[in-house]
Amino acid sequence: MSSRKTDTRTRILEATWQLMEQRLGKSISMSDVAKAVGISRQAVYLHFDSRTELMIATSNYVDEIKGLDERLSQFKAASTGIELLEACVDVWGNYIPEIYGLAKALLATRDTDEATAATWNNNMRCLRDICKETIDALEHEGILANEWSQQDAIEMFMTIISIQNWEQLTIEYGWSTSEYIARTKLLLKRTFINSSTPKQ
Amino acid sequence: MSSRKTDTRTRILEATWQLMEQRLGKSISMSDVAKAVGISRQAVYLHFDSRTELMIATSNYVDEIKGLDERLSQFKAASTGIELLEACVDVWGNYIPEIYGLAKALLATRDTDEATAATWNNNMRCLRDICKETIDALEHEGILANEWSQQDAIEMFMTIISIQNWEQLTIEYGWSTSEYIARTKLLLKRTFINSSTPKQ
DNA sequence: TCATCAACTTGACACCATGTCAATTGACAT
DNA sequence: ATGTCAATTGACATGGTGTCAAGTTGATGA
């Protein structure tokens, strides 16, 4: 069988991911990857046509392993809008640290590479669904602050919980994950939930 | 006098800035700059030792022309915390579009280049002062929502009005400047101002 | 008027990155 | 044993940063 081929491919993906996590932000070269796997640089090109393709494949590989989808099972327990909001920040806030290196690498090439930008946006789509679900629930329950239209609220919600904001608050300002989660929940609740509604 | 030298240096800075604004996000090379000015690539190195130095010099050049400092004169009119908050978002929200290309270019190399990161952080320091002043005023007036410590509020404030958030809301989601300003004010007021206090 | 100095030129080079190509080795299956 | 396929070595094109050397041009001062 082509178990050798498959194996090397996986080893490349694994090494790429590890390098991304290690060297947050710093770009990694094909040579770096090859060296880490212990094969020649050209061998990497036998499995991935280009650097871009490798990065996208790595993204999909990581997605498969730590699927965000599965984590959303926590959402089934949430019945109210506020519970959805809390679950959303809990899941996402614990998820980001695990994929931060990868996300950073994708974001870095996003501006110069059409394909990675598409991959990134695709990944963000599932987050948008969650945000929409949450805002919809709040609206349905009549506790969405009336200054917000549904569309505006969703987009602001997405922006608040963006990886860049997580990065600034945790990496730059040193907030712990639990601090990040608690304060982000606080901000979202104060922002979107009608003040006549009791909080928490 | 060395008016020729000074002149060329200024022309390089001007061209660099223009290129940054034109090709948002895409990195620009020393050749691009030289071509735009109409001189040889090596001549650029006569004025700036490295690409990094050119970018930092461009940042300072732009800062000189459209100084954020001067715009803060609008702050003198603000007496209350809420007025400060509004003035802050007004000034900053109208400022970002003018320096977005430059900011984008600096942010792109920030992760791989220590010097540009330092320049960027230096630029952000003046923003932090404004945020602090605003939060302090709210606290002093007793209308800062009591869930927030002063430090946390400042850092969250800074994060909310970050250029990345502006980029996502305007460039990606298509918000106009006035929409961005209005909705950011709304979010900040709801988040930080005690709900017993009448808004607006 | 002539010499000088600084800005700028051309052209070459070192180094590193991506990406391509050709020829070769080594293992494994039929 | 022969073919197939992964992987290797080595060369090459392209394009980026940064350095160096030698030559050109033009303004300025003696």
Image (cartoon, coloured by chain):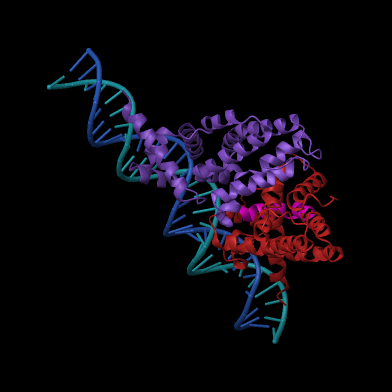
Chain colours: A red, B purple, C cyan, D blue
- Magenta part of the protein: which range? A93-107
Relative to D15, residue B7 above or below: above
Name the quadrant containing residue B137.
Answer: top right
At 65% from the left and 37% from the top, the residue drawn is: B85
Q: Position of residue B155 (x, y in %)?
A: 71, 38
Residue in front for this viewpoint, B64 or B23: B64
Q: Residue at x 39, y 33 (%)?
A: B9
Percent of width and height locating residue B109: 56, 44
Q: Position of residue B71 (x, y in %)?
A: 53, 33
* Residue A67 left/right relative to A106: right
Q: Which part of the image, by quadrant, shows the C terminus of chain B?
A: top right
Q: Nearer the viewer, residue B80 or A200?
A: B80
Looking at the picture, tell me which residue is in the foreground, A195 or B107.
A195
Magenta region, mostly helix, strand or loop?
helix
Q: Residue at x 65, y 60 (%)?
A: A151
User: What residue occupies the far front of the structure in this picture?
Assistant: B198
Answer whether residue B10 is magenta in the image: no
Answer with the quarter of the image where residue C25 lies. Answer: bottom right
**Number of disc labels:** 0
* Quarter placement of the N terminus of chain B: top left
